[in-house]
Structure formats: C-alpha cells, structure tokens
Image (cartoon, helix red, strand yellow):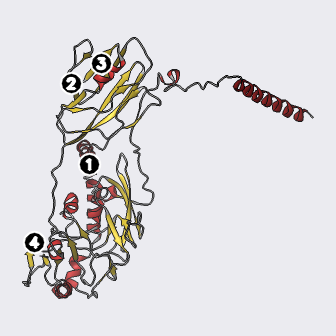
Amino acid sequence: MRLRMKRKIIYFILIACLILVIYHLSHGGSLHVIPTPRWRESAVQHIMPLHLSSNRSSCDCEDESVLSQNVPSDQLDDIIKLRKKEYKDYLLRMKTNVSIIVAPANSPLQYPISGFTVAPQQRSDIPGLALHTQKGKWYKVTLRVDSGVLAVKDAPDEKQVNGQNKSELTITSANLPQLNNLLSRVTYTSTIYHIRTSDLVRFSYENHKVTFPILIRRHTVPVLYNPGNDINSLVTIATKTFLRYKQLHVLLKSIRRVYPKIKIIIADDSLKPESISGDNIEQYIMPPAQVGGVVGGDQFHYTLEYVEGDDGGCLKRFEGRHHSPLPGHDGCFFVDVVVNFFLARTDAVRRVGFDPFLKRVAHTVPLKTNFKHCNMYILLISSSFLLFCIHTFIPCSSSEFFIDGIGKLMVVSCKHLSIGHQTHEEQKEYDSYRNQRIEEEKIKLAHHYFKNYLKCMKY
C-alpha cells in the first residue's frame, strides 16, 4: 500500500509540473535556457597540466634467454657501466625520452595542441594563440620556453609586452581583442641547434596554465631514384657465395632464364675464389669467410614483440604471425622479418645498415638444412643465398638486420609468392665454416645485450 501511495504522489507532481509549463507558454511566457559556462571557473582554476613520464618499466624476462649470462664474467661490470652510458647518450641523440602532456579541461587559453614544427634557430609564428574569457578590467598572459626565445612582432611598447627576445614573455592589455591581436604575432626562435629535438611552451592566464610542444626539425633534402623503363634498371640482384660454385652456377642459369639482362652482383669470400664471368655480372672478391649468408628454418616470416625497459628491453619472436593485411593486395601481410630473401628500397636499407660484427653467422633461429621455400617478389629463382634489392649491394640477409629495423622498416610478406631451395648437399669444409658453434652463439647474444640494449630474447 505504501509503495502504491508513493507512486501516485510522484505521478501527481509530474503532471502538476507539466500543467504549469503548458500554462506558462500559453500565456506568452518563454522558457529561458541558462547556457553552460565555457569553463567552470571554480572547478578548473587550480587544474594544472599533467606531465606524465613515458610508460617504461622493467620488462619481465620469464623463460627468455637472459643475455647478460653470455657476457664474460670478468667483463660484465665494465660492460654494464658502458652500456648504461651509451644508452643515455642514445636517448639524448634520438630525443626518445619525451614527456606525455595531458591538457587541462575547459581552459580559456587557446593554443596549438600538436603539429607545430619549426626549423632550428629560425623565427616562426606560433599559430592559434588566443584568450577567451569573460569581460574584465585587465588581462595578463605569460609564455615561457626552455630552449628558445619569444617575441611579439611589431610590439607597441614595453608596457604591453615585456620580455622581448627572452625565454619568458608577458603580454598585458585592458582590451581583450587587442591582447589577442598581440598573441597572434608571437614568435618562437630556438637558441640551441639540433636537427631533431623539441621544446615546451608554458602558457598561463591567472590560475589557468597549459603546456604545449614545439617540434624542432631540420628540413631534409629529398633523395629520389630514377625508376628507369624496365626491371633491368629498377632491380639489382646481389648474392654471395662461399665454396659453393656449383650452386652459384645453377642460380645464375635460373636468373638468366627469366631475366637475361638484369645486373647481378656476387660477393665471393671463398678461400680460393674462382672467376665468374658473364654479361652484366660483377664479382667482388672479399676477405675469406667474412661475408654473411643465412639459411632460415621452415617458417616464411614472423613478427617481433619488443618491450622497452629501463634496465634493457625484452624481445620475443612469434613464428607465422602477421600484423595486418596489406590493403589492396590479397594474401600479403605486414610482418617484422622475412627469412633469407627480400626486395628492398635502397633508402630503407641504408637507414638500417648491416652489422659487420655478425659477418658469416647471423641467426636468431637454430640452423636447419631442409628449408623448402622462402618468400620473394619474383618467381623461378633458385639459390640458398640470394638477395634482391633496388640499386644497392647487400652482403647478407639476417634476422639481425630486421631487429635493427624495428620501427624503421615496413616489411611485407605474401603467401602466394615463393622461391624453391636447391637440394642440400653435404660439404664438410663449407659446413665447418657455416654451422654456428655454441661459443659463437654466446658471443652473438652478448653483442645484442650491449648493442641493442636488450635484457633478454626469446626465439
């Protein structure tokens, strides 16, 4: 009974309110909607912009290989100190330790949130600066930077603009449109020369404070490549050979059957080199047993998961996985590593480069000799050590190349493209150089510990 009575009371109140509204409107009245303030003065006066550090922590190695175990014990302390110093210098060079800025809610200050980029030590207008506030007797804003100077172009006098060509600039006015006119003419000039860095602008009015970034970038000069008229001018084939001239001749015959005029570069680090001749073939004699070449396992491609950590990153490999499909190309997917053969742009390869320390042995997978296929852009080519590239010479194809290329390369693998592998023939002299020994594996992992600032690897 009590519940029913409460419901009746609520219904009665709602009906009464509705009748009053209808009566008010029918007698010439109007409903006044009170606008919501552009910002809640009481709520945001003391809100400060938040500066959050990047999400970095010590990654968990679990069952991965802890790389420091491969460093000789008598060298470990010195390596740890040098590794820490070099990593700190790397962060300074690359400017990767950037703070995350969270903007305050409903601020009366207008400013560029992102995308404002300037050339080093060149004056640039700061776009979009303005103040939107209620009418007052006096307006005062302050801007401050760390690695540059601020100024107002054609400033009227020091009473309104104080701090011309200094790191802190104050603008005052009794007229809001005039203040905004002065803000529209504020410029920034970096005082420290760096081709890739940033600065922070702290912009304040009364108790409202915001922070926004300025990217400082040196403009790059475009480097273009003439694609020519056909594949012969577009692609250069680079391969290496070491004590396997029989397989090399099979490779050359296979290439010439499909591409009779394409340029072929041979890096030969055999102990007793044999002369290789032919149209558009260049043979380069290298120091014996020094040029790398890789035979992978039975997977075509894989992805890498890299997690940063203050004391070193963690790297994991996932066989057969991909990131996402390549739009417009059925059966092609973005990956991180392709094994053994690849077609690459010159500029992309040069951004990464090859590590001469690894030389002949460069694996992140155990060696297998029954490798059946590997991905490639061109069909009907047969060899164990073949690399395709655009106007460049690549001495080896290794997973380490792709590890160094994380975040620098866009890598694609296509399921419907493959290359046959020649039948493996046992060659004791070759295998004695080729197969990776346990001590070489330890040296390589210790190298990754220092060079790539890795704490552990799982592959």
Q: Earlier in the sequence, mark 4 or mark 1?
A: 1
Q: Quadrant of the N terminus?
A: top right
Query: Which residue is label 1 attached to?
Result: 83
**Disc 1 residue type?**
Arg
Residues tagged 2 and 1 counted as in contact (Cβ below 8 A)? no
**In front: label 2 or label 1:** 2
Query: Which residue is label 3 attached to?
Result: 171
- Calculate the distance from the C-alpha at mark 4 to the C-alpha at mark 1: 31 Å
Q: Earlier in the sequence, mark 4 or mark 2?
A: 2
Side of 9 where 66 appears, left or right = left
Helix, strand or loop status at disc 2: loop
- Calculate the distance from the C-alpha at mark 4 to the C-alpha at mark 2: 63 Å
**Disc 2 residue type?**
Lys
Q: Residue at x 33, y 29 (%)?
A: 129
**In front: label 1 or label 3:** 3
Side of 413 where 345 appears, left or right = left
Residue 271 picture location, percent across and down: 11, 79
Q: Earlier in the sequence, mark 2 or mark 3?
A: 2
Query: Which residue is label 4 attached to?
Result: 287
Q: Earlier in the sequence, mark 3 or mark 4?
A: 3
Q: Residue at x 32, y 14 (%)?
A: 173
**In front: label 3 or label 4:** 3
**Disc 3 residue type?**
Ile
Q: Earlier in the sequence, mark 2 or mark 1?
A: 1
Query: Which residue is label 2 attached to?
Result: 153
Helix, strand or loop status at disc 4: loop
- Calculate the distance from the C-alpha at mark 3 to the C-alpha at mark 4: 68 Å
Helix, strand or loop status at disc 1: helix
* Along the viewing direction, whichever of 110 and 243 lies nearer the viewer: 110
